[in-house]
Image (cartoon, rainbow, N blue to C red):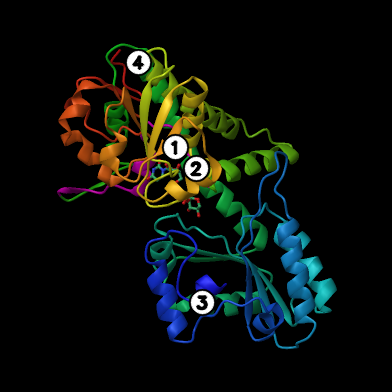
Amino acid sequence: MRLINSGISPIHEEGLDGLLRKNISAGRLRASTKLEVAIVNADISIIAVGTPFDGSEIDLSYIRKSASDIGMCLKLASAYHVVCVKSTVVPGTTTDVVGPILEELSGRKIGQTLGLCMNPEFLAEGSAVKDFMDPDRIVLGVSDQRAGKLMSDAYAPFCCKDILITNPSTAEMCKYAANSLFATAISFSNEIANLCASISNIDALDVMYAVQLDRRLSPIIGDDRIRPGLMSFLLPGTGFGGSCFPKDVKAFQAYGQKNGHNMPILHSVLDTNKSQPDVTMKLIKAAIGDLRGKHITVLGLAFKPGTDDVRESPALLIIKMLLSCGALVNAHDPVAMNSAKEVLMDDNLNYYNELSESILNVDALVLVTSWPEYKNIELIEALKNIPIIDGRRFLDKQKFPTYFGIGCSNF
Ligand code: UDX
């Protein structure tokens, strides 16, 4: 709390520190541990707590606790109040779990002095500030018209053309469906990539590029081709990670199963994703053989560039596998080093602050996160003599005599 009130973001997120400082000094934002004061003086409370997946369903204990705390505070006031769920929760949670807790503890009735809203977040880490300030869509799943009006008014300054007002369960489903589509695009590309790699003389990068150039995916308008963001998900790689895609797809698949739907596509999406770090390991072994005693640099620890988040990062899985095969690992990341050190320490793992030092005298280099600065390694002469394993198809394969890329059948 003290960190936030002094304008310092506890996470690495572009633009967030500046935004915190600006609004704290203008008196518009203050972090507090005094829940009662915060709730009673507000028109809207937003629940944005974690919903970890325990293997069979999402853990709603933090949601329940927040709803109870808010409900008890609301008992002390009488003005109309909307409670908005931002956390990713399976359909029915807002109406069937949060609503009843709030009604019971606040003594209020939904539709009278209490409104309920489910408002999924569509922020991607690294561009969260931009995604919030300039939203592509706002989904408001509301209990009634009055709650919808208050929530729409709150979002009015963001001038979003596409505000979908619906019911809470539909809003909950939107988030899972959206994340599942992108995760599916990634696993689809990796399935194709793995097939390409097993057949001589096929490069999945060219294949996926040709797929992307279909005008129904990348429209041609006049002389220009539009390259929608989805295209960057249709590429070969070591698989998706982060705090959302893996957890949400697993939770969605389990939710489907519970409701009598096996969700075979999502099963396969997860299976393919699980195997991608192994695919990268196979490439490394194909490149340098026995890993015992070999010095290997892993570039990139964050689950994607632009963040210090290492949750479900393929990089950490690959490092663990390298270590278990007896390799000596040098690791580098421009911002995620400290987060990685918190979860992964080993006598045979050395973290390097300097990229140039991390790649000195090593037997192979593995790129797992496509940080823009790693493009510069294409210019380093010494790297022309060692195998380069590109887990993101980020480097120009022509620049390295011994290049091994996911989806690339060059060995
Ligand atoms: C995701 C959703 O994009 C966001 O809308 C939702 O609110 C939360 O989950 P995030 O987890 O931050 O956001 O990451 P995202 O940028 O979507 O990346 C997820 C995975 O997809 C990463 O592992 C990344 O490597 C991969 N990815 C990402 C791509 O393959 N291509 C991209 O262009 C971006």
Which disc, if any, is residue 221?
none
Which disc, if any, is residue 181?
2
Crowding at mark 2 (Cα within 10 Å: few <14, some 14-19, many 20+)? some
The residue depicted at 27 percent of the width and 14 percent of the height is 201
Residue that badge 4 annotates: 288
Q: CA distance from mark 4 to mark 2?
A: 36 Å
Which disc, if any, is residue 5?
3
Q: Amino acid at mark 4?
A: Ile
For residue 135, above or below residue 227:
below
- The quadrant in which residue 261 appears is top right
Q: Amino acid at mark 2?
A: Leu
Which of the two labelled residues, at mark 4 and mark 2, occupies the earlier sequence position?
Answer: 2
Quadrant location of the C terminus in the rendered image: top left
> Judging from the image, what secondary structure is the residue with disc 1 in?
helix
Front of the two marks 4 and 2: 4
Does the numbered disc 1 mark a residue whose Cβ is under 8 Å from ligand 1?
A: yes
Q: Amino acid at mark 3?
A: Asn
